[in-house]
Each structure stands twice: as C-alpha cells, then as structure tokens.
Amino acid sequence: SKSIIASIKKASKEGKKLLAILIDPEKVIVDEIPSITQKIEGLNANYIFIGGSTVKKEVTEIVTKKIKENTKIPLILFPGDYTQISNSADALLFLSLLSGRNPEYLIEQQIKAVPFLKNSTLEIIPTGYILIDGGTISSVLKVSKTTAIPQENIELAVSTAIAGMYKGKQLIYLEAGSGAKKPVNSKLISTVKQHISIPLIVGGGIKSKKQLQNAYKSGADLVVIGTAFENNLDLAI
Ligand code: 1GP
C-alpha cells in the first residue's frame, strides 16, 4: 500500500489542504457505519481518523473493520491508549504527548503498544502531539493528567513543536481538545508552521467552514473534525 506520510508531505509541499473526519468508536452505532462513510465521502475527506479517549479494545476492532468494509478512504488510528489498535486500519499515529510531563503518555503507552505493532502491517507515523488550551477541560486533559499550553504562550508551543521535529517526529499535531470552545488561534498555527519543516495537523473545536478555512490559511496542512461532523454541521468546502 502507498505511504500515507509520503502523501501528506506531498500535499503539504504543494499547498493542497487535507481534511480528516474523526470517528470515536465509542460514539458510533455499527449499523450506521455505511451511511456515515457515505457522508464522509460526500465531504471529500482525505482520511478517517479513528480513536477516542476511552474506548474498549473490541469496540475499536469492530468499528475499524466495519469502516474498512465500507470505504476506500485511508483509515488512520488516532488512539487514546495502546489498546486502540486494529490491523484493519492503514496507519497509526504513534503519538507522544509532548506538551505534557506525564511519562505514561511520553513513553509507557508506546512501550505497551509494541506487542500489538511488532507483527502488524500498519504504517507507523511518529507524531508530536501538543495540547493547546481550548477553553474547556477536554477529555484528553483528564485522561492524560497533563496541562495544556495556553493559547498566548506561542513561544512554548513553537519550542515544543521544534523539539518534536528534532526528536524525529514526522508530524506535529496541535490539539485544542475535542469540543473545544476556542480552536487553536491563527497566530499560534502560523508561527508554529513557520518554524517546522514537517506537516502540521490542527484539530479541536473547529465547527464552521470559516474556522476550517482559517486554520488552512494560517498554515494547517490537515484539519481534523469530529464533533461538528457528529452534529451534522455544514462543513462542505
Ligand atoms: C481532533 O479531537 C479533535 O483533533 C476533534 O475535535 O471533536 O472538536 O472536532 P472536535
């Protein structure tokens, strides 16, 4: 299969903007997956991300398999923990929560994932995951027991992103948290983008076309939308 990271890098270089729809396996009704994938295809999404903060292992497997049966859109796991891995997906964001200081999400979970990944065909994509304060206590903050970088602390966000790049991450992901009141602000996105040479993902709290376009204009290469999709908001670009 084709390399997903290569296609993200290519799009980033060419200035082509990418969209991913996030499916939380805990929130999805399996029988509705055919219509959900149809809706995602209607949005011309480039990727489907699959993951949530707390998902039972069997649920990730069942949902991922079912989505795979219903669409050719590449599936990328965006796991809340090491149990959320399914070989029915195409790739895995191998996340390090770089904004946090909890070793569990910097290296412990990654080690626990290895038995599941050793013999898998998943494309593993090292990703620096950076939480930005979105004005709400997101579930990722609760689960990870870490703090988010304030929206105003651009310097810290930029240094964290650059450190991630130096550590060899292939992607940087700025996350305001699912259902965030305030998405990551333009200035922060554009400043981070100026300082890294790897593609930039932005997500959390983006619920209008205007916010989506704003994230793209600021420098996001790939935008992730979950809640607004679940709520059927009009996102067609
Ligand atoms: C992806 O967690 C976000 O980065 C999704 O956020 O649910 O607010 O779109 P929303």
Image (cartoon, helix red, strand yellow):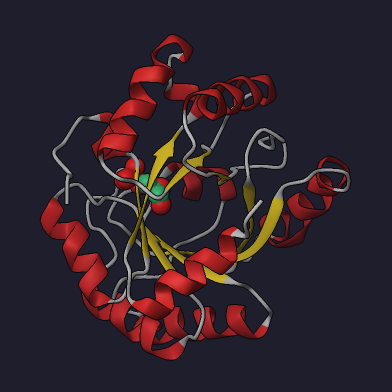
The answer, for residue 162, to whether it is visible in the render is yes
Task: Estimate the x, y position of residue 155 in percent, counting from the top left.
Answer: 40, 87
Task: Estimate the x, y position of residue 196 in percent, counting from the top left.
Answer: 47, 85
Instruction: Residue at 63%, 66% (x, y): give it.
Output: 101
Q: Decide which of 168, 73 is in the foreground and name it.
A: 73
Identify the image quadrant of residue 234.
top left
Instruction: Residue at 64%, 86% (x, y): give it.
Output: 166
Number of numbered labels in the structure image: 0
Q: Horizontal placement of 45 versus 206: left or right?
A: right
228 vs 137: above or below: above
Q: Horizontal placement of 58 versus 181: left or right?
A: right
135 vs 226: above or below: below
Identify the image quadrant of residue 97.
bottom right
Task: Estimate the x, y position of residue 205 in percent, counting from the top left.
Answer: 27, 50
Instruction: Residue at 63%, 49% (x, y): give it.
Output: 91
Instruction: Residue at 33%, 36% (x, y): give it.
Output: 41
Identify the image quadrant of residue 60.
top right
